[in-house]
Image (spheres, rainbow, N blue to C red):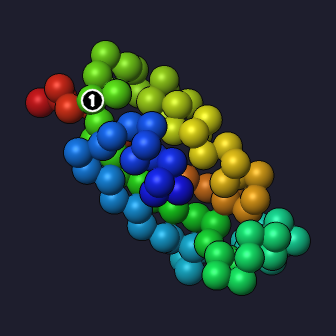
């Protein structure tokens, strides 16, 4: 996830927080999809991302969210269940 975001967004700030432990009761935590991600990533399904990037300059919030979700489409196909996003443009005050 980090490598994809760094390559595509060249962020000045990239914080990734794994919130999966707070969601252990969700059915998605126990699905076959998580097992397909490999033993080191089983259960890693919920994340919070804080990203500041010039790439977001001039983009509305929805467009930023769509971009990040599109960039991480492969992660969603292999078990990522939810993202909480805080996405800021470099030019934001």
As rendered, which of 41 and 6 lies closer to the eye?
Answer: 6
Return the x and y of residue 32 as percentages of the image width and height: 87, 71
Q: Is residue 57 at least partly visible in the picture?
A: yes
Q: Is residue 85 at least partly visible in the picture?
A: no
Which residue is situated farthest in the top direction here? 58
As rendered, which of 31 and 90 lies closer to the eye?
Answer: 90
Quarter of the image holding residue 29? bottom right
Crowd rating for badge 1 (residues with CA inside 10 Å; few <14, some 14–19, many 20+) = some
Whether residue 15 sits left or right of residue 66 in the image: it is left
Which residue is situated farthest in the right direction here? 32
As rendered, which of 35 and 18 lies closer to the eye?
Answer: 35
Query: Measuring 48% from the left and 70% from the top, which residue is drawn there?
Result: 18
Q: Is residue 56 above or below residue 79?
A: above
Query: Measuring 45% from the left and 30% from the top, which residue is drawn there?
Result: 64
Q: Is residue 81 above or below residue 27?
A: above
**Count of numbered circles on the image:** 1
Query: Measuring 73% from the left and 62% from the top, which residue is drawn there?
Result: 79
Residue tagged 1: 54
Q: Is residue 10 above or below residue 75?
A: above
Is the C terminus in the top left, top right, bottom left or bottom right quadrant? top left
Return the x and y of residue 62 as percentages of the image width and height: 49, 26
Quarter of the image holding residue 92? top left
Under circle 1, the secondary element is helix
Return the x and y of residue 10 as percentages of the image width and height: 33, 40
Return the x and y of residue 57 as percentages of the image width and height: 29, 22
Query: Measuring 50% from the left and 71% from the top, which residue is drawn there?
Result: 19
Which residue is situated farthest in the left direction here? 93
């Amino acid at each position: 996830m980090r490598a994809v975001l760094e390559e595509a967004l060249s962020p000045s700030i990239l914080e990734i927080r794994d919130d999966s432990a707070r969601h252990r009761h969700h059915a998605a935590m126990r699905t076959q999809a998580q097992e397909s991600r490999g033993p080191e990533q089983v259960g890693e399904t919920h994340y919070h991302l804080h990203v500041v990037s010039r790439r977001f300059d001039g983009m509305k919030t929805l467009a930023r969210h769509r971009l990040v979700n599109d960039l991480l489409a492969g992660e969603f196909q292999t078990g990522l269940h939810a993202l909480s996003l805080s996405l800021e443009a470099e030019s934001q005050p």
